[in-house]
């Protein structure tokens, strides 16, 4: 049992103390400086309708790659090695955790069934279509030897939407339904594709029987449920620890540290048990924002809210910068030089399959989902369906990581088939992120014209100091208490999802909150900023026991 | 130019996606879980007079080491590899940056000359004494071949006080003068020992002439000044960028991200140019808390203050846990088995040298420092001198890192001399941290009996929710504005340090703050929490242009 950190850093060299290894220090400087540049440039371009921070980072990464390629005279092939471990262990967890932490929980749980339908069933449909089409088409083309496992892997790779990019192009306040559908689907989709990918690698594919298919399905549901439970468990444990131990003698740093460490622990535990860390840390974030967040001091709340968002922001930028710079790795392209036409062709075919594969489940499943909804305003209309289809077309770092895993296993892309798949993945990722990403915002504006007063508010938002306008407390949290409470009768006549939500709230108030804390169970300390918020929430939560702890 | 991250993580294996490498995932889980345990246990033991979080972490690390050693049947020699890169690149920067960010700037700059005297001259005295004594004593003992460079390295290694541990045993609010002296000295001391250590490794030691000595001295001053300027420059740049670009359209996450990245960039730049990253990031922290912190939104202030403290807290715990677990690495001890007496003897001698080496500069330099001070209350009395001497006796992760660097270069402690030095370093670090660390708090109480009302306040502090008592704004910041301003005449008659401080304030208000922002130059936005603080500070800063931005 060797501790990885020690090993990892041993390799960085230990000749002199101050400079661990000159080149790696140079790279880190470059990278941090570029990140700063991305933030400043992203800020300056904020008013721009077309650009967003991820595309800026991609472009800066590409430009830097070109510059370094020119400086090194085209020889620096191993400029940056895309590392799936860096991605899956350090960059993805904060992003997904923050997404869970900041997600509008009410919207998410209202649409929970639809999200799971899209994320799980939809991804499987997409996987099946892309895999079969790849087998049919690529076998006829002369692109080198690919086995059945490779084709199935292609299906899994190109079924993974880029939820990180979705966060950047859709706006939670502008299009809450779409955001929660597409993003929620993205998280489940990530998990599903990783599960499918692992299943494809591990299962014996020589003979696909119905039993194997059912085994896969069972495996998926097992992973989904256990991952969710692990995440929720870690979140509840952190809430319980902070409520029980830290009650009345808070230390802000300890609270924040416990939250960060528990969230990370849940992710790593999921990885340890070969569950889906993405799902786990997502649900851990949701539970933490529902219970733990309400047990900590006012300062811890502000700190966690913004610190998590900042981590996530830096990690996102890092990924896009990384993907941009990595795209120019010479070695990958050297094999494609001989047949540039084939590579373009394969990339175009894959892009087409991505479009078709997603269309093949978004529209039918939306239809199915609409059948279960009675109220007209809850149905997903055609324009929204188009947007859901479009916003999930981007392929990102998950696809890259999976592709590298599958096609660089035996040596470094020495086989032409593998080389073409790697370069095609890069092409699809870059093209879909840039082109599809650029068009998404205008498309949202075209298909969903916002009401006048709202549009004014939104357009003025970026230029106004948002943090000063929104009150210190509860921004971004679910606005459940600000809505008029429907009567129980109307609630029961409403859709079944609402009833489930209603009973969950009852259960939450009666059993969960007294044990794990949460809104309305914050200790009352005179003169603290909490006092005010307590009064506010007490006003809305008249039916809850605000006085009892 | 190879990007280090990619390489680092490549080594972790990429067989399956979900489990990068099983053993490393297990280690990470264990480590994160232990960190959580340390926090909870440290919290429960907070009322305890003797324990503190660092000693708790050390003990937990030792216990875990024993458990794993027993489980593996005594064969797991490479359980944890102490990595100086992990320490110097990832763990030390947040700790030192946070120290600079939260340090009471007034105290620090008032005692600046004394701090530099202790940190630079004192460390050199200590280095000289320990080196010469080591040459005299160890040459007579039969502990294997050690060259002149090794003896000088021993001097540098055991001159490095553990500023991290100092932070834990001394209290900034309780003993502000001592804290700023010992901690400030610790930072300069760390930098000095690293500089001496590098100088010893790089210079030709075959013939020590006066020229070489002066070269070393010149090198040190060059490093000290350039490192300080780089740190201050990075801090000012961040202040300027945030003030110019983000004015009026703040985005909290971007501000926090820029601050984190600029601070880290300053550290990495210092490493790149072979400067002292420790000094750089320390001064970057000071400048950021003086200028940048006042340019950001209210939320960013709370977030940065607590997020940086949390990073630092986690990194400190990590180091102590790490040192504790690393101490039981079998391989290091296997060579010592044959002659346990020698190892104990060497450790005892080294501990004695540490005590003598520190005493040899604290008392004479305090005497010198007192000569320059006129006011009685500014002089360092004998009790305080004893405390300064005692609080700086702990040796920590810096010593470990330097020792590993020097004595594991050629193979892994294959030479008996090297093996003994490594184990002795571990022994000295553990002993000094645990025993000296445990005694420091009682010693402070014994030598510096606090006034009744203050002692009550302090003793009740840990059990009261500190975050609620202290107002949201400005806690921990310099309380410069709350003091009555002395008249210019009295100022000029006062000690020269004060006059420098006075002119600095003039210059700061007239030139620096209008450009780089800072207290009194926050944009006025009605209804924001800043409004109140602005009135407060305006009350004290009547002679400043509070209205002009």
Image: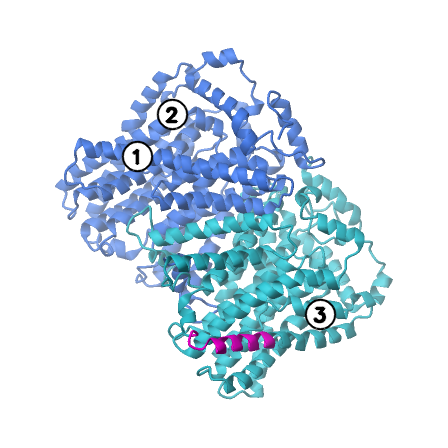
Chain colours: A blue, B cyan
Residue name at image x 74 percent, y 45 percent:
B547
Q: Which residue is mark 3?
A: B386
Q: Chain of mark 2?
A: A
Residue at image mark 1? A220
Identify the residue position indicated by label 2 in the image: A113
Left or right of B117 in this view: B310: left
Q: Secondary structure at mark 2?
A: helix
Q: Residues within 10 Å of mark 2 (few under 14, many from 20)?
A: few
Q: Residue at x 45, y 24 (%)?
A: A449
Quarter assignment of residue A212:
top left
- Is residue A51 visible in the rendered image? The answer is no
Q: Which residues are magenta?
A: B336-353
Q: Which residue is more in the foreground, B65 or B281?
A: B65
Label 1 is found on which chain of the structure?
Answer: A
Q: Provide residue B158's location: percent of width, then percent of height.
A: 56, 73
Neighbourhood count class around disc 3 (C-alpha, 10 Å): few under 14, some 14–19, many 20 upward = some
């Amino acid at each position: 049992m060797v501790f990885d950190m020690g090993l990892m850093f041993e390799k960085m060299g230990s000749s002199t103390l101050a400079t661990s290894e000159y080149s790696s220090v140079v790279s880190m400087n470059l990278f941090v400086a570029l990140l700063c540049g991305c933030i400043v440039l992203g800020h300056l371009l904020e008013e721009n309708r077309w650009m967003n921070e991820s595309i800026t980072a991609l472009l800066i990464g590409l430009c830097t790659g070109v510059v370094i390629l020119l400086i090194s005279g085209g020889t620096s092939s191993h400029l940056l090695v895309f590392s799936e471990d860096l991605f899956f262990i350090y960059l993805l967890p904060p992003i997904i955790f923050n997404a869970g932490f900041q997600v509008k929980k009410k919207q998410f749980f209202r649409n929970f069934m639809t999200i799971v339908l899209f994320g799980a069933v939809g991804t499987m449909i997409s996987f099946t279509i892309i895999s079969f089409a790849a087998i049919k088409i690529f076998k006829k083309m002369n692109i080198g030897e690919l086995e059945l496992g490779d084709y199935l892997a292609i299906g899994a790779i190109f079924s993974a939407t880029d939820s990180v990019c979705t966060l950047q192009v859709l706006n939670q306040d502008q299009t809450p339904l779409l955001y929660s559908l597409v993003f929620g689907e993205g998280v489940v989709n990530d998990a599903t594709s990783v599960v499918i990918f692992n299943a494809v690698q591990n299962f014996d594919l020589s003979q696909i029987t119905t039993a194997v298919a059912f085994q896969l399905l069972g495996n998926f549901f097992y992973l989904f449920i256990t991952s969710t439970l692990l995440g929720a468990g870690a979140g509840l444990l952190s809430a319980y620890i902070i409520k029980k131990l830290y009650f009345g003698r808070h230390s802000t740093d300890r609270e924040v540290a416990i939250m960060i460490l528990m969230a990370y622990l849940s992710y790593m535990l999921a990885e340890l048990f070969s569950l889906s860390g993405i799902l786990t840390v997502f649900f851990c974030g949701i539970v933490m924002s529902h219970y733990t967040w309400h047990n900590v001091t006012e300062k811890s709340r502000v700190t966690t809210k913004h610190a998590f968002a900042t981590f996530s922001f830096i990690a996102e930028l890092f990924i896009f910068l990384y993907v941009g710079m990595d795209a120019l790795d010479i070695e990958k392209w050297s094999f494609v030089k001989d047949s540039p036409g084939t590579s373009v062709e394969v990339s175009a075919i894959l892009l087409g399959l991505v479009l078709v594969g997603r269309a093949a489940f978004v529209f039918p499943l939306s239809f199915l989902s609409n059948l279960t909804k009675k109220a007209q305003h809850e149905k997903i209309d055609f324009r929204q369906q188009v947007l859901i289809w479009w916003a999930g077309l981007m392929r990102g770092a998950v696809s890259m990581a999976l592709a590298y895993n599958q096609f660089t296993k035996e040596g470094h892309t020495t086989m032409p088939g593998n080389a073409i798949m790697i370069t095609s993945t890069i092409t699809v990722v870059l093209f879909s992120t840039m082109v599809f990403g650029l068009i998404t915002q205008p498309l949202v504006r075209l298909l969903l014209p916002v009401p006048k007063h709202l549009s004014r508010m939104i357009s003025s938002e970026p230029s106004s100091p948002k943090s000063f306008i929104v009150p210190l407390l509860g921004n971004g949290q679910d606005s459940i208490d600000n809505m008029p409470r429907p009567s129980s009768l109307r609630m029961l006549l409403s859709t079944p999802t609402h009833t489930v939500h209603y009973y969950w709230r009852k259960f939450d108030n009666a059993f969960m909150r007294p044990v794990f804390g949460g809104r309305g169970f914050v200790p009352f300390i005179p003169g603290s900023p909490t006092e005010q918020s307590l009064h506010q929430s007490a006003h809305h939560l008249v039916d809850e026991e605000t006085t009892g702890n």
